[in-house]
Every structure is written in C-alpha cells, then in structure tokens.
Amino acid sequence: MKYFHLIWSALFRRKTRTVFTLLSVLAAFLLFGLLDSVRTAFANAGGSVAGVDRLITVSKVSFTMALPKSLLPRIEAVPGIAQVSYANWFGGIYQDPKNFFPNEAVAENFLDLYPEWSLSDAERTAFKGTRTGAVVGATLARKFNWKLGDKIPLQATIFPQKDGSNTWTFDLVGIFHAKDPKLEGQENVLFFNWSYFDEASRFRNGSVGWYATKLSDRGRADQVAQAIDRLSADSDHETKTQSEQAFTAALVSQFADIGLIVGAIMGAVFFTLVLLTGNTMAQAVRERVPELAVLKTIGFSNKSVLGLVLSESVLLLVLGGVIGLAVAGVVVGIVRVKLGATVPLARVGGPIWLRGLALMVVIGFIVGVLPAIRGMRLRIVDALSGR
C-alpha cells in the first residue's frame, strides 16, 4: 500500500482516457450484474419447493399439454392442502400484437389463493356470476383506460371458438390491486372465467392447463408435491409439481436457454473489454517508459515495476467494476419492486459480487500482464536513450 499514490497517479496520468475506460468497465459490469441476476434466479428456481405455500402442477411432458379436470378432487384429498384451483393459458391479443399481456382462464376460486391481491366482495361476486366476466390488474386497467363495465375484445392466437370466431369479448367486472406496492408488477394480467372458456372453446373441453394449490403448512411443500405427482404416476398425464417461481423459470426456459444466452453475451462483452483495456494499458506503459527507467535507476527492482503496472491494471478494473455492480444492484432493486414475481430476478448479493470481483481481478491481470512484463524487462540505458 505504500506505493498506492504512485499507482493512483499513474492511472490518472491521462484523465480523459482513464475516465472513458472506466465508463467502459462500468458498463460491462453493470450488464454483468443484470444478466447474472437473471441467470441466478433461473438457476435457483428449480429443485426444492420447500418454504413456499403455493404450488403449481403441470404436465410432466410440457406446459402446453392439458391435464384432466378429474384430477381436481384427488388433489383436494391430499393431506396438507388447504385449497386447489386451476387455470389455462389463453394468449389472446388486444387490438395489436404489441399490446400483449398475460391473460388466463381461471376457476371461480382462483383469486382466493392470492390474498396479496385486493378485490372487493362485490367484484368477486360479479366475477363468479358473470359468464363472460373478467378482472384485470390496476396497472393494466390504467394502461388501456379500462373501467368497470367495459367490454374487452381479445383475438385468440391458440383457442378459436366453436363457431370458428377468433374474437372473444369479455365484460370487465373487477379491477384488483396489489396490497404491497412492491408487487405492483403483478397487476399486468387479465383473468376470465374458465367455465366460459371451456364451453366456448373448440379445444380443451373438460381439461385444464395447470392446478394451483394452497398449502395448509408450507413446511410440507416437498411432501405434498410428491404426493400430488404420485396421483398420476405411470399414466398418460403424469404431472410435475413445483413452486410458482420454479414454474415461471421452467416456462421461460422452454423458449430459451437462459444460461447459454447470458454466457454468450457476457463472453462477447468481456472479450471486447479485454481488448479495450489491454490497449489502454499498453499505451499507458509506452508513454511512461522514461519514468519506469527513472524508477529503476533510483532502486526499484524488476519485480517492483511488474507489481506497479499489474496493480494499476487491476485497480482500473476494480474501480469501474465495483461502481458498475453497485449500479446494477440499484437497477435490479427497482425492477424487482416494479415487476414483482413477473420476471424472476435475484438480488445482486454476495455470490454475484464474489463472481464479479473475481472477474475484475482476473481481467485486470490479463490486460496488465504483457505491459507489466515489458516494463519489468526494460533496460535503463535503452529507455533513457529513447530506444
């Protein structure tokens, strides 16, 4: 640390160049923090369902495969279950494909499983009593200026009606609010009556997309999940029961390999970063050849010069990287508040920081090693003579 002032002075010898390089490092590690947050969330979503009080049961083969409604009473009979509901993905489009939002056909009691959503008793009664009734989240209602009593037409992309029409029209009878402002992102969805969907749809009559289960004891989540899956073992509709978070992660993974995508993007980003910072360090050492010769003249050893240049390189990466990860933590926090559980995101916590710091140090050594070796091998006479 006694040479820190030398390292700091050398790093900011060309302030403009250093600032722009730091911004590049900052951007790279900001992106790393955001993408690793997504990757971590999906990587940790599978496996155990312990510690949750809601489970989702889908077909073991694929989320798109239907399950028989006859499973309902059998699931309800499993010990440890407080309530069971069911739903089906609809995938309708409102006016234009760019207006896409989640929309699902749900059972009458589906909203009862989500006490974090506020819906008046009158609106709940209207939803249960209106064949074409629909409820939407407050955020979605504000986006399209919907109000109670409006008719909402959706164009089916998967499920046409029995008469061949692709237009499904719903009566807006309720608008729910997330009780916790941090869950505001969950208000971007439309639910409508499963009975209407089942009666009017050309496909899936008498079948459901998935079952949602409320546990009486969250500590028995794994045990209950296994009991549910045993109900359909060795049948043509085997099931997979998991937590809501794991279900969301599995759903997205059907469309893309998150780990591969994140790895490819970060590989390209850090390769570019190595080239950029490597060029910066090489140029900085070339400009300071006479200064390094003076240091050797007054007694600095070859190893000392090697350490100074390597330390400068690592400091450059650590400064920019730490700021980038800190900004990523703030951004992820804001996104988690706005979107809630809609998009899985892990906090930028200890594991991500450790991986980030390790990358900063490794990249710092990589980009600094060649200029440092050049400085170490520098001959005083050649440097002072300009050769």
Image: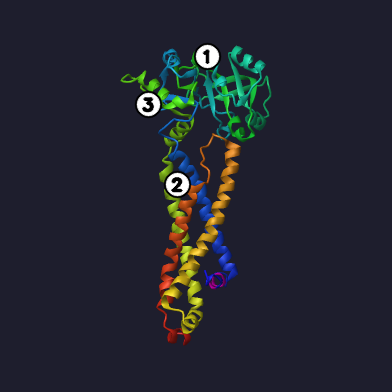
Residue carrying label 2: 262
Observer-nearest residue: 87 or 318?
Answer: 318
Compared to 259, does 247 lie above or below?
Answer: above
Q: Where is residue 92 in the image (x, y as percent from the top left)?
A: 53, 26
Measure the alpha-carbon separation of dots 3 and 2. 26 Å
Q: Where is residue 307 in the image (x, y as percent from the top left)?
A: 45, 71
Q: Residue at x 43, y 33 (%)?
A: 250
Measure the alpha-carbon separation of dots 1 and 3. 25 Å
- Amino acid type shown at disc 1: Ser
Q: Residue at x 44, y 65 (%)?
A: 367
Q: Where is residue 360 in the image (x, y as percent from the top left)?
A: 47, 58
For disc 1, the neighbor class at 10 Å (few under 14, some 14 to 19, many from 20) is: some
Region in magenta:
6-10
Residue 9: say if magenta. yes
Observer-nearest residue: 13 or 20?
Answer: 13
Element under disc 2: helix
